[in-house]
Image (tube, rainbow, N blue to C red):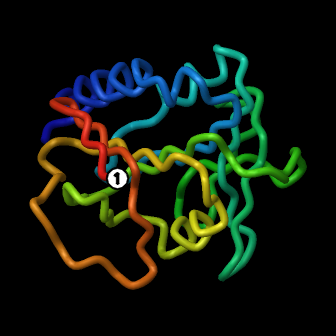
Amino acid sequence: MLSDDKDKASAIIAKRLFSLNEWKEAERIFLYFGCNGEVKTDEIIKEALDSGRQVFLPRVKSDTDMVFIKIGSKDKDMEYGAFGIPEPPDRGEYATAPPDIIVVPCVASDEAGHRIGHGKGYYDRYLKQCAGAIKICPAYECQITETFIPEDTDINMDIIITEERVIRTG
C-alpha cells in the first residue's frame, strides 16, 4: 500500500473508531504509536487529547518492563525509545489504574482477534494487566487474514477496525 493510500485508510479507520460507543464512553485511553506499516495513530491520539480525555502512551523501561505515562500534548517532549517509537519522557504521571480502552495497531490480524505487532512481547505482557479494558486493533484491510496461529503470549483484540469494516471478535 502506498503512503498516500495509508494516510487515507488511517483517516477512515480513525473515523470508524470515533463512531464506536466504546470510544465515546472512554475516559482513560491507552494508545500505541503505529510504526513500520501499522495504521498511523497520530489522528487518534490528537482527537483523544482534544476531547479532554486522559491519554497515556507507553515507555519501555527495561528488557521486560513497560509503563504508560499520561501525556498532555502529542508532540511535546516526546523522545524516541528503544524501538525507534516516540515515547513520553520518564517524568510524567504513571498510569495507576487500567484503561477503559487500549488501542493497539498491528502488522497483521485474523478475524478472531489474534494479532502480530512490533511490540516484541512488551505490548502483550502489558495487555495481560489490562483485564476489563476493551482492546481495539486498527489495521489495514490488507493486513487481515482468515486465520493464523498466534504466539502463546499474544493477547486477542476485542475489536478490529479497518477502512472497510469493524470486526467484533467476542
Indicate the position of residue 135 as horizontal and vertical percent values. 48, 49
> In the displayed image of the protein, which residue is found farthest to the front?
170
Residue at image location 30% in from the left, 65% down from the top: 114
User: Which residue is identified by label 1?
Assistant: 170
Q: Is residue 37 left or right of residue 122?
A: left
Q: How many marks?
A: 1
Give the structural element (helix, strand or loop) at label 1: loop
Residue 88 in the image: above or below residue 64: above
Asked if residue 25 is positioned above or below residue 51 in the image, the reply reads below
What residue lies at 75% left-to-right and 35% top-to-bottom? 71
Residue density around tag 1, few if under 14, some if 14–19, many if 20 or more, within 10 Å: few
Q: Position of residue 76 (x, y in %)?
A: 73, 31
Q: Is residue 20 above or below residue 81?
A: above
Q: Point out the image quarter for the N terminus.
A: top left
Residue 153: quarter of image: bottom left
Task: Kindly indicate the quadrant of the structure image that contains residue 101.
Answer: top right
Q: Position of residue 16 (x, y in %)?
A: 33, 23
* 29 lies left or right of 134: right
Quick one: 17 or 80, which is closer to the camera? 17
Q: Quadrant of residue 61?
A: bottom right
In depth, the one of 23 and 54 nearer the eye is: 23
Give the amino acid type for the residue marked by disc 1 in the picture: Gly
Residue, x 35% and y 82% (percent of image)? 151
Residue drawn at the location 42% of the way across and 24% of the way down:
20
Q: Residue 57's x, y, as percent?
A: 66, 46
